[in-house]
Image (cartoon, grey):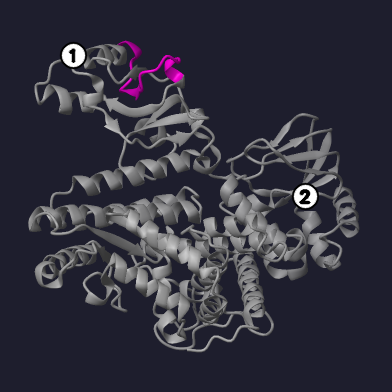
Amino acid sequence: MQAEHIEILEFLRQHQPFTELDDKVLQRIAEHTDVTYYKAGTQILAFGEEITDWHVIRSGVVEVYRRSGELYDRLTTGGYFGQFGLLRNNRIRFPARALEDTLVYLIPEAMFTELFEEHENFADQVEVEDRSRLRQAVARQIDGNQLMSAEVDSLIQREPQLVTVSTPVRDAAIRMSEAGVTCVLVVTESDQPLAASRLVGIVTDKDIRNRLVVPGLPYDTPIEDIMSGCIASVEHSQFVFEAMLMMLRYNVHHLPVMRHGIPIGVIALPDVIRYESQNSLFVVRNIFKAKTVEELAALQPEVKACFSRLVAEDANSRMIGTSMAVIGRSFKQRLLEMAEAELGPPPVPYCFLALGSMAREEQLIVTDQDNAMILDNAYNPKEHEAYFVALAKFVCDGLHACGYEYCRGGIMATNPKWRKTLKQWQQAFVDWIENPVQEVLLNSFIFFDMQGVWGETQWASQLTGLVAEKAMHNPMFLACMARGALGRTPPLGFFKGFVMESDGDHSRSINMKRRGTAPLADLVRVHALAIGSRAHNSFERLQDLIAADYLPEGQGPDLRDALEMLAMVRIRHQAKDLEAGRVPDNSIEPDNLSDFERKTLKDAFQIVSNAQKSLRFRYQSVRAYG
């Protein structure tokens, strides 16, 4: 062994995580290690660049940063960095810079991977501890994504063009042309400066064409007559991702940007597209352009491609789940438009509901349809039933044609059991809460995840408010829900090994929905009901629980990280199935995961298991029998 290798060997013997490795292994490491020097202030690793070596500090000081520029860690002799990039896509997630003149040992990727996969103690020490490993895995998922880190005000290029409600359209059009913009914001008449006046509408160049020129209105028509009112807006400090979702939800191409109630700019679709390479905006646009069910069904490849691109671009589970849910809602909305065009206007008002994962905005590419209908209290079955039977059939058959399988449990608007008047729905929820019967509630869990997608959507909000108010004051109901939430457990054995399916088409696998994300969503739902949270999304419910200090210390953030990890394993599995031309499913084979993924997956399952024990303990004093 050469002299420089002997020096490296002695260094490794004295520093973690190498101290427990035998000398033969250490000698091999030393023989394959290179040494490099970095002058103070030198960039060692830059975000996004390829990484091929694990970095161990021989001498000096290195600072590691988050992508946002925030200091993440400061390392000295014996410290190491770059492992997260090696374990995921070989791309730098945490940039590093030499604070002082620094010598670094470079251990090749192949050697690092061999050590990580074959020496468990080494791997555990590299990751520090179970909770840290999971948290770091989740953190780099978020840090690596522009949509989650870029704020809306970074997209603003100029001040907004403001006009009052009485401004002639001609004058507004001249302003738009001179400023080179495609819209103006409309504010109320006031003695205050325009920027301090109340924002009441927006007018785009398309509005001028369609609402002024085509109908032949005079050019001096007040702009109030052609503006779009009740407009959606976004706060300057929100993320680009949130602005994208708002455009998706409301099918708009312009969003006013507000700071403390004052418009400071407008972002347009092209601004967001610079960040939104996944094209979910275009999928939604094409859904609303479709003229027939056949045209809608033909968009399935675009939906799958959108899902795959989101995964490839390192979107996190919240982004993917919300985007796919918005796409699903858009299919429902367009089908309802088509149904009403074919059947005529509804005889009484109604609200079409999304249930389950779509309502929670946690939908993936493998999903069935869960929906229901709220009917006006004036509904008369003899006079009105035929219309709503036809409407429900049109929508549910259309969703099936678009890739949303029929619900095997029959929870669809085509089932007369799930077409109720508002008063009947209110009574149903009151009965479920005040007279909890285990068997009934097990079949009703899905209705506690509910959003209106069409029609009188405020009715869905009223029901959510009713549930939030009554559930938190009924311990018997919460105990009954808790018992139901404990029916599905994480697949961990006595020694933290995986317990896998033993028969069927997916033997030696784990169903990541049934044994992972679903149990976690169930227990979060129970806790959220207990505090009166009106949130639908599991991440938002966890935020409410953390803010209310309702969970044991540290459990809220742990559950958040576990949900992200479990969801992303499921998501990546489905994306790989699509890439390979297979029908995607929820069943993964742990043997096909990397050692790092298996470890973090066990961490996440253990967190869910511990949270279920906590849930059981919280309600064990309440006996809830059906």
Label 1 is placed on what type of residue?
Asp
Q: Position of residue 377 (x, y in %)?
A: 24, 64
User: What crowding class fits label 1: few (fewer than 14 Cα within 10 Å), some (14-19), or many (20 or more)?
Assistant: few
Of the numbered discs in the image, which one, if any, rests on residue 295? none
Instruction: Give the x, y percent position of residue 374.
Output: 27, 64
Q: Which residue is mark 2?
A: 80
Q: How far across and how far down the image is residue 464, in percent?
A: 42, 61
Pick whichever, 82 or 329, lies toward us.
329
Which residue is nearer to you in this view: 438 or 542? Answer: 438
Q: Which residue is mark 1?
A: 220
> Pointers 1 and 2 in contact (CB under 8 A)?
no
Q: Is residue 579 visible?
A: no
**SS under mark 2:** strand
Left or right: 53 as drawn, with respect to 176: right
What's the residue type where badge 2 is placed? Tyr
Task: Specify the segment rendered in magenta.
Answer: 178-195
